[in-house]
Image (cartoon, grey):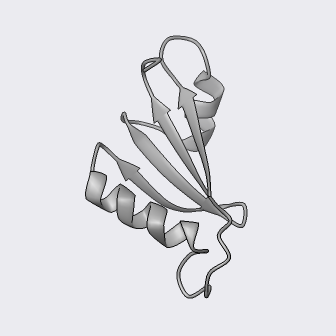
């Protein structure tokens, strides 16, 4: 699983924010096979941990294999 963080604060990365449809912070997007398969708005740790565990194993019904990508967007350089 790949984890990416994008700082969307200020003028930087506004194109990413708009393209990804980010409207709240933090926002987490899960991509699998090039498609966005889930998103979480807000700091819901239990849901995030569950999605990360699920897609680290390859996603629902995949039988394993990994390959997920989680994109984290924030409005600060934390």
Quarter of the image that includes the N terminus: bottom right
Considering only vertical position in the picture, is 63 above or below 18?
below
Between 48 and 23, the residue placed more toward the observer is 48
Q: Furthest residue to the top?
A: 10
Q: Is residue 37 left or right of residue 2?
A: left
Q: Position of residue 17 (x, y in %)?
A: 56, 32
Q: Position of residue 13 (x, y in %)?
A: 62, 22
Considering only vertical position in the picture, is 74 above or below 49?
above
Quarter where residue 69 is shown:
bottom right
Between 69 and 41, the residue placed more toward the observer is 69
Q: Position of residue 65 (x, y in %)?
A: 68, 76
Who's the residue at 46% across and 67% down the image?
A: 53
Quarter of the image that includes the C terminus: top left
Who's the residue at 62% across and 38% down the image?
A: 19
Considering only vertical position in the picture, is 51 above or below 72?
below
Callout count: 0
Considering only vertical position in the picture, is 17 above or below 42?
above
Q: Position of residue 66 (x, y in %)?
A: 65, 70
Who's the residue at 49% across and 34% down the image?
A: 73
């Amino acid at each position: 699983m790949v984890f990416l963080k994008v700082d969307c604060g200020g003028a930087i990365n506004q194109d990413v924010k708009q393209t990804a449809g980010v409207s709240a912070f933090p926002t987490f997007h899960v991509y699998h096979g090039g498609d966005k398969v889930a998103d979480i708005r807000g700091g819901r740790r239990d849901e995030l941990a569950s999605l990360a565990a699920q897609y680290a194993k390859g996603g629902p019904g995949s039988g394993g294999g990994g390959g997920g990508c989680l994109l984290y967007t924030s409005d600060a350089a934390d």
